[in-house]
Amino acid sequence: MEDLNTGILPETKPQRPMMLTILCILTFIGSGMNLFSSLFIAGFYDTYIEIVQVFTEKFQLEGMETLLDAKPMFFMVSAIFYAGSLAGALFMYRLKKKGFHFYTVFQILLILAPMYFMHLQSPGIPELLFTGLFILLYSRHLKFMS
């Protein structure tokens, strides 16, 4: 006897666009490394200060002295924000729209944190451009997320 087609199609899983996969992987790498380094610096803060001082004196790079203004709390807060960014990317990787909102909020907080903790007048242009680009690229994939 022939099987009758009942007209019910099997449920298909939505496909993740390649560009979204690439963006998520880049975020996993960047936020993951920054999460690790923020936790590491917060845990070994005194050693960090010594290294930055030696590096600043030896190479005389402008702006390095602002790193000395960062206290352990800044690095702990940054670690939390990077973890939130990482969680957002993981949600987006799983095609969940809430991931975009997590990612965007935590990226904005990451831009504002140095201004608060290190009393900077404005965020850096590269940080703004890079974060803005990623948010824009992620936003273009919202239609694939539920």
Image (spheres, helix red, strand yellow):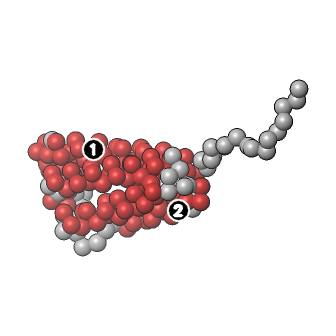
In the image, is 80 to the left or to the right of 1? left
Work out which quarter of the rendered image holds the C terminus and state it. Answer: bottom right
Residue 15 in the image: state x and y as whole percent. 63, 46
Work out which quarter of the rendered image holds the N terminus and state it. Answer: top right
Q: Look at 15% across and 59% down and name the residue there.
A: 69
| Residue designated by label 2 | 139
In the image, is 34 to the left or to the right of 41? right
> In the displayed image of the protein, which residue is found farthest to the bottom?
121
Residue 92 vs residue 113, the one in the foreground: 92
Residue 72 in the image: state x and y as whole percent. 15, 51
Mark 1 belongs to which amino acid?
A: Ser
Query: Which callout, 1 or 2, points at the residue further toward the start of the chain?
Result: 1
Disc 1 is placed on an element classified as helix
| Residue designated by label 1 | 37
Whether residue 26 is visible here, answered yes or no, is no
Q: Look at 11% across and 45% down and name the residue there.
A: 46
